[in-house]
Image (cartoon, rainbow, N blue to C red):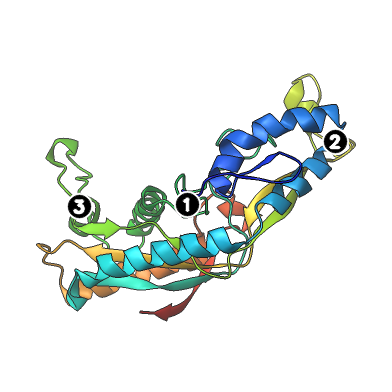
Amino acid sequence: MTEPTQEKNNTEVVKNKSLYWDKIIYEKSRQYIIGNFKKNDIIKEIVKNMEFDDTIIQAIKSLSERRNNIVKNYSKKHILIDGTFKLRTKLLLGSGLPSLIEVGIHLSRNYGIPVIPATSIKGAFAHYLLEKMEEDKTITEELYKKIFGTDLNNPRENQRGLVIFLDALPQGDMRIEIDLINNHFQPYYMKQDNPPNDWYSPVPVQYIVVGASTYRFTILLDKESNFTEEEKNKIKTEFKNMLKLYGIGAKTNYGYGRFEPQAEN
């Protein structure tokens, strides 16, 4: 992790964006209050401090090298997906995390970049397959158990899943942006005596998202797994459909988190 440096004005410049977002920003909030900053100005200041720089480039390079070393340890038949996917919409990760500006964002603690956690990818895909299972008979309970280790009929029979999901890594075109949503019913949500209607003034809420960026997704198979080619193709197809049609992260109902496949390694 990069050490803070001293500038001429004797203020610390923290190069790790996660440290800045989780810790330093709360210390700086005192300056915002004293300086009578407006909230919009605070958000612009935050985004400016989280812009793409040499630190992020080095972090992405380091993570990519580590990922390459992991993939090299697997034979081709055990690499289900290892490729890049382009965001078609904006991506919101960790919206419920604590934040100075109300809406959070997930950043890798050590690298300070918005990786998509493997647990989020696995959870989103599990939920997607459960929904698809009702209409697609080729997605069986047995296949679901092989992937995730979950026995849908008897939780006591759960086992280790045979599909390994890794964090999705942003690539060199990563961008942090400001997005906006208007709350039209704030008085209703604040006090139930106020009926929901369109006569209230909209209350704009700004928050930070990942803009047009490319991510590397990697899914591996346990070396002791015995998936058929048909099963592997099915998992691969449905995972791509999930990223394209359902999305990942927060606000997917509003079109966030949709990806298009780009290239496979």
Of callouts 2 and 1, the N-terminal one: 2
**Crowdedness near tag 2: few (<14), some (14–19) or many (≥20) residues, C-alpha within 10 Å:** few
**Crowdedness near tag 3: few (<14), some (14–19) or many (≥20) residues, C-alpha within 10 Å:** some
Q: Amino acid at mark 1?
A: Tyr
Quadrant including the C terminus: bottom left
Above/below status of 39 relative to 258:
above
Name the residue that disc number 3 marks: 161
Query: Which of 71/119 is in front?
Result: 71
Q: Quadrant of residue 56?
A: bottom right
Is the residue under label 3 in contact with that under label 2 (CB below 8 Å)?
Answer: no
Residue 246 position, x and y percent, is 50, 60
Q: Would you say 125 lies left or right of 220 here? A: right
Name the residue that disc number 1 marks: 111
Closer mark to the observer between disc 2 and disc 3: 2
* Residue 86 visible in the shown view: yes
Q: Amino acid at mark 2?
A: Phe
Name the residue that disc number 2 marks: 37
Above/below status of 241 relative to 31:
below
Secondary structure beneath label 2: loop
Query: Which of 192/148 is in front?
Result: 148
**Crowdedness near tag 1: few (<14), some (14–19) or many (≥20) residues, C-alpha within 10 Å:** many
Is the residue under label 1 in contact with that under label 2 (CB below 8 Å)?
Answer: no
Q: CA distance from mark 2 to mark 3?
A: 50 Å
Secondary structure beneath label 1: loop
Secondary structure beneath label 3: loop
Question: Who's the residue at 12% across and 40% down the image?
Answer: 157
Of callouts 3 and 1, the N-terminal one: 1
Please tell me how many numbered marks the rendered image carries.
Answer: 3
